[in-house]
Amino acid sequence: MPKIDAQLGIRVTKDLKSRLEQQARREMSSVSALIVRVMEEYLQSKGNGKQT
């Protein structure tokens, strides 16, 4: 995973936060890492992947 050097703050429902925490625990990951991975996969699927 590339170096994370920017921060983004978002508000979510308590339910969504809880579900993200549960999934991150199942994957032995942090919530932040889970969200970054999911968003990268989403952008890639939309043809907006990282440009090299």
Image (cartoon, rainbow, N blue to C red):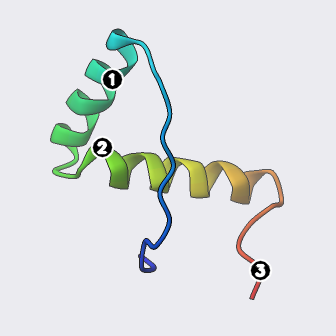
Residue placed at 42% from the left, 13% from the top? 13
Report which residue position mark 3 lands on: 51
The residue where tag 1 is placed is 17
Residue receiving disc 2: 31
Which corner quadrant holds the N terminus? bottom left
Q: Disc 2 residue type?
A: Val
SS at circle 2: helix
Q: Residue furthest right?
A: 47
The answer to whether marks 1 and 2 mark residues whose Cβ atoms lie closer than 8 Å is: yes
Please give the name of the residue rendered at 51% of the width and 49% of the height, measured from the top-left corner. 8
Disc count in the image? 3
Q: Amino acid at mark 3?
A: Gln
Mark 1–mark 2 distance (CA, rounded to whole Å): 9 Å
Of residue 42 and residue 16, the one placed in the foreground of this image is 16
Q: Is residue 29 left or right of residue 45?
A: left
Image coordinates of residue 47 in percent, x first then y, are: 83, 59
Is tag 3's residue or tag 2's residue first in the polypeptide sequence?
2
Q: Tag 2 or tag 1, which sits nearer the N-term?
A: 1
Callout 3 secondary element: loop
- Left or right: where 38 falls relative to 28: right
Q: Residues within 10 Å of mark 2 (few under 14, many from 20)?
A: some
Residue found 30% across the figure and 43% down from its top = 31
Q: Position of residue 11 (x, y in %)?
A: 47, 25
